[in-house]
Amino acid sequence: MNQNSVPATDAISKLVQEFSKLPGIGPKSAQRVTFYLLRAPDEQSRLLAEALLSLKQKITLCSTCFNVTESDPCPICRHPERDTSQICIVEQPQDILALEHTGIYKGLYHVLHGAISPTEGIGSEDIRIKELLSRLQNSTVEEVILATNTNLEGEQTAMYLSQLIAPLGIKVTRLARGLPFGTELEYADDVTLTRALEGRQEF
Ligand SMILES: [Zn+2]
Protein backbone atom coordinates (compact mmCIF):
# COMPACT_ATOMS: atom_id res chain seq x y z
CA MET A 1 0.00 0.00 0.00
CA ASN A 2 1.41 3.36 -0.99
CA GLN A 3 1.19 6.04 1.70
CA ASN A 4 -0.47 8.43 -0.69
CA SER A 5 -3.17 5.95 -1.61
CA VAL A 6 -4.61 6.00 1.90
CA PRO A 7 -6.96 8.90 2.52
CA ALA A 8 -6.32 10.80 5.75
CA THR A 9 -9.20 9.66 7.90
CA ASP A 10 -9.96 10.97 11.36
CA ALA A 11 -8.28 7.96 12.96
CA ILE A 12 -5.15 8.55 10.93
CA SER A 13 -4.89 12.28 11.47
CA LYS A 14 -5.65 11.84 15.15
CA LEU A 15 -2.74 9.42 15.59
CA VAL A 16 -0.42 11.59 13.47
CA GLN A 17 -1.36 14.52 15.68
CA GLU A 18 -0.60 12.57 18.87
CA PHE A 19 2.75 11.29 17.59
CA SER A 20 3.67 14.84 16.52
CA LYS A 21 3.44 15.96 20.14
CA LEU A 22 6.27 13.60 21.16
CA PRO A 23 9.81 14.95 21.55
CA GLY A 24 11.99 14.45 18.51
CA ILE A 25 9.09 13.48 16.26
CA GLY A 26 8.09 16.00 13.61
CA PRO A 27 4.94 15.82 11.46
CA LYS A 28 6.73 13.78 8.76
CA SER A 29 7.95 11.11 11.21
CA ALA A 30 4.54 11.06 12.88
CA GLN A 31 2.97 10.32 9.53
CA ARG A 32 5.55 7.64 8.75
CA VAL A 33 4.98 5.84 12.08
CA THR A 34 1.21 6.04 11.69
CA PHE A 35 1.21 4.54 8.22
CA TYR A 36 3.71 1.92 9.31
CA LEU A 37 1.33 0.82 12.08
CA LEU A 38 -1.57 0.80 9.65
CA ARG A 39 0.27 -1.75 7.52
CA ALA A 40 1.74 -3.74 10.43
CA PRO A 41 -0.06 -6.75 11.98
CA ASP A 42 -2.86 -5.88 14.44
CA GLU A 43 -0.81 -7.52 17.18
CA GLN A 44 1.85 -4.82 16.98
CA SER A 45 -0.63 -1.99 17.53
CA ARG A 46 -2.21 -3.89 20.39
CA LEU A 47 1.14 -4.41 22.12
CA LEU A 48 2.01 -0.74 21.63
CA ALA A 49 -1.34 0.39 23.03
CA GLU A 50 -0.97 -1.90 26.05
CA ALA A 51 2.58 -0.71 26.69
CA LEU A 52 1.41 2.91 26.53
CA LEU A 53 -1.42 2.31 28.97
CA SER A 54 0.65 0.35 31.47
CA LEU A 55 3.31 3.07 31.40
CA LYS A 56 1.04 5.41 33.33
CA GLN A 57 -0.82 2.72 35.27
CA LYS A 58 2.21 0.87 36.59
CA ILE A 59 4.97 3.43 36.85
CA THR A 60 5.32 5.49 39.97
CA LEU A 61 8.19 7.38 41.61
CA CYS A 62 10.37 5.78 44.27
CA SER A 63 9.59 7.63 47.51
CA THR A 64 13.28 7.51 48.46
CA CYS A 65 15.24 8.41 45.32
CA PHE A 66 12.42 9.56 42.98
CA ASN A 67 13.50 7.21 40.22
CA VAL A 68 10.70 5.80 38.08
CA THR A 69 9.72 2.35 39.31
CA GLU A 70 6.97 -0.26 39.34
CA SER A 71 7.53 -0.94 43.03
CA ASP A 72 8.34 1.43 45.87
CA PRO A 73 11.14 1.51 47.01
CA CYS A 74 12.74 1.00 43.61
CA PRO A 75 14.98 -2.03 42.89
CA ILE A 76 18.15 0.07 43.36
CA CYS A 77 17.10 1.48 46.75
CA ARG A 78 16.13 -1.93 48.09
CA HIS A 79 19.11 -3.81 46.62
CA PRO A 80 21.09 -5.24 49.57
CA GLU A 81 24.44 -4.88 47.83
CA ARG A 82 24.26 -1.22 46.84
CA ASP A 83 26.66 1.07 48.69
CA THR A 84 24.48 3.27 50.87
CA SER A 85 27.36 5.62 51.68
CA GLN A 86 27.21 7.17 48.19
CA ILE A 87 24.39 9.08 46.53
CA CYS A 88 24.67 10.19 42.93
CA ILE A 89 22.49 13.19 42.06
CA VAL A 90 21.02 13.24 38.55
CA GLU A 91 18.52 15.45 36.78
CA GLN A 92 16.37 12.79 35.12
CA PRO A 93 15.57 9.08 35.55
CA GLN A 94 17.13 8.42 32.10
CA ASP A 95 20.48 9.51 33.54
CA ILE A 96 20.36 6.56 35.94
CA LEU A 97 20.01 4.22 32.98
CA ALA A 98 23.14 5.74 31.42
CA LEU A 99 25.16 5.47 34.64
CA GLU A 100 23.93 1.95 35.41
CA HIS A 101 24.94 0.92 31.92
CA THR A 102 28.59 1.64 32.74
CA GLY A 103 28.35 -0.97 35.53
CA ILE A 104 30.95 0.73 37.72
CA TYR A 105 28.75 2.70 40.11
CA LYS A 106 27.35 0.73 43.05
CA GLY A 107 25.92 3.50 45.20
CA LEU A 108 22.42 4.97 45.36
CA TYR A 109 20.81 7.79 43.37
CA HIS A 110 18.63 10.82 43.81
CA VAL A 111 16.63 12.18 40.89
CA LEU A 112 16.01 15.93 40.98
CA HIS A 113 13.52 15.92 38.10
CA GLY A 114 15.02 19.01 36.53
CA ALA A 115 17.67 21.62 37.13
CA ILE A 116 17.58 25.15 38.46
CA SER A 117 16.95 27.51 35.56
CA PRO A 118 16.13 31.15 36.31
CA THR A 119 15.46 31.78 32.61
CA GLU A 120 12.77 29.10 32.58
CA GLY A 121 11.48 30.09 36.00
CA ILE A 122 12.60 26.83 37.65
CA GLY A 123 13.78 27.50 41.19
CA SER A 124 15.31 25.28 43.84
CA GLU A 125 11.85 24.60 45.29
CA ASP A 126 10.61 23.21 41.95
CA ILE A 127 12.96 20.21 41.92
CA ARG A 128 13.53 17.48 44.54
CA ILE A 129 16.14 19.32 46.61
CA LYS A 130 14.10 19.48 49.82
CA GLU A 131 13.66 15.71 49.65
CA LEU A 132 17.38 15.25 49.09
CA LEU A 133 18.28 17.32 52.13
CA SER A 134 15.91 15.46 54.42
CA ARG A 135 17.35 12.23 53.06
CA LEU A 136 20.87 13.38 53.91
CA GLN A 137 20.01 14.55 57.43
CA ASN A 138 21.10 11.97 59.99
CA SER A 139 22.08 9.56 57.24
CA THR A 140 25.18 7.41 56.82
CA VAL A 141 25.92 9.03 53.45
CA GLU A 142 29.60 9.88 53.10
CA GLU A 143 29.76 11.13 49.54
CA VAL A 144 27.36 12.95 47.24
CA ILE A 145 28.31 12.80 43.57
CA LEU A 146 26.88 15.66 41.55
CA ALA A 147 26.05 14.23 38.13
CA THR A 148 23.85 17.00 36.80
CA ASN A 149 24.31 17.88 33.12
CA THR A 150 27.35 19.91 32.14
CA ASN A 151 25.28 22.75 30.68
CA LEU A 152 24.62 26.08 32.42
CA GLU A 153 21.57 24.85 34.37
CA GLY A 154 23.36 21.68 35.47
CA GLU A 155 26.41 23.62 36.65
CA GLN A 156 24.28 26.14 38.54
CA THR A 157 22.38 23.33 40.21
CA ALA A 158 25.61 21.53 41.16
CA MET A 159 27.01 24.74 42.64
CA TYR A 160 23.83 25.39 44.62
CA LEU A 161 23.72 21.81 45.94
CA SER A 162 27.37 21.79 46.98
CA GLN A 163 26.76 24.90 49.08
CA LEU A 164 23.84 23.19 50.81
CA ILE A 165 25.47 19.81 51.31
CA ALA A 166 29.05 20.68 52.29
CA PRO A 167 27.99 22.13 55.68
CA LEU A 168 26.45 18.73 56.54
CA GLY A 169 29.97 17.30 56.64
CA ILE A 170 29.41 15.14 53.56
CA LYS A 171 32.03 14.98 50.83
CA VAL A 172 30.72 16.52 47.60
CA THR A 173 32.22 15.46 44.27
CA ARG A 174 31.43 16.39 40.68
CA LEU A 175 31.82 14.18 37.62
CA ALA A 176 35.17 14.78 35.94
CA ARG A 177 35.51 17.15 33.02
CA GLY A 178 35.73 14.31 30.52
CA LEU A 179 32.19 15.24 29.65
CA PRO A 180 32.19 18.08 27.12
CA PHE A 181 30.33 21.22 28.17
CA GLY A 182 26.69 21.05 27.16
CA THR A 183 26.49 17.27 27.45
CA GLU A 184 23.26 15.71 28.57
CA LEU A 185 24.19 12.71 30.66
CA GLU A 186 21.71 10.36 29.05
CA TYR A 187 23.46 10.75 25.68
CA ALA A 188 27.01 10.29 26.96
CA ASP A 189 28.73 7.07 25.94
CA ASP A 190 29.87 4.41 28.44
CA VAL A 191 33.58 5.14 28.13
CA THR A 192 33.16 8.87 28.70
CA LEU A 193 30.77 8.29 31.61
CA THR A 194 33.04 5.71 33.22
CA ARG A 195 36.01 8.10 32.99
CA ALA A 196 33.90 10.94 34.36
CA LEU A 197 32.80 8.80 37.30
CA GLU A 198 36.24 7.43 38.08
CA GLY A 199 37.89 10.83 37.76
CA ARG A 200 35.32 12.70 39.83
CA GLN A 201 36.75 15.62 41.76
CA GLU A 202 35.98 17.06 45.12
CA PHE A 203 33.68 20.00 44.46
ZN1 LIG B 1 14.74 4.44 44.77
Image (cartoon, helix red, strand yellow):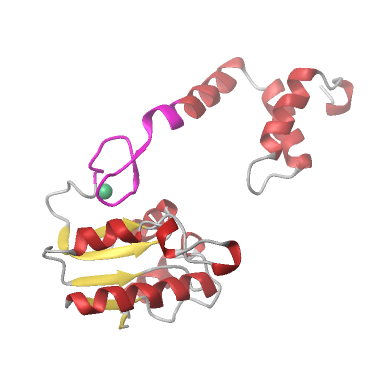
Residue 144 % position (x, y): 26, 70
Q: Position of residue 32 (x, y in %)?
A: 74, 35
The C terminus appears in which quarter of the rendering?
Answer: bottom left
The reply, left or right, for residue 190 in relation to residue 81 is right
Would residue 33 be found to the left or right of residue 132 on screen? right
Q: Residue at x 16, y 61 (%)?
A: 83
Magenta stretch holds residue 58:
yes
31 vs 124, left or right, is: right
Query: What residue is rendered at 67% in x and 40% in y?
Result: 21
Q: Residue at x 43, y 54 (%)?
A: 113
**Front-lying residue, 44 or 133:** 133
Give the quadrant of the N terminus.
top right
Farthest top residue in view: 42
The answer to whether residue 105 is visible is no
Q: Which residues make up the magenta segment?
A: 54-75
Residue 192 visible from this viewpoint: yes
* Residue for point 57% across, 22% down: 44
Where in the figure is residue 136, as x and y percent of width and height? Answer: 20, 63
- Residue 69 quadrant: top left
Along the horizontal axis of the image, is 92 left or right of 183?
A: left
User: Which quadrant of the structure image shows residue 120?
Assistant: bottom right
Q: In this picture, is 122 found above or below 175?
A: above
Residue 100 versus residue 183 in the image, above or below: above
Residue 134 position (above or below residue 197): above
Does the stretch in magenta take in 183?
Answer: no
User: Residue 23, position in %: x, y?
Assistant: 63, 47
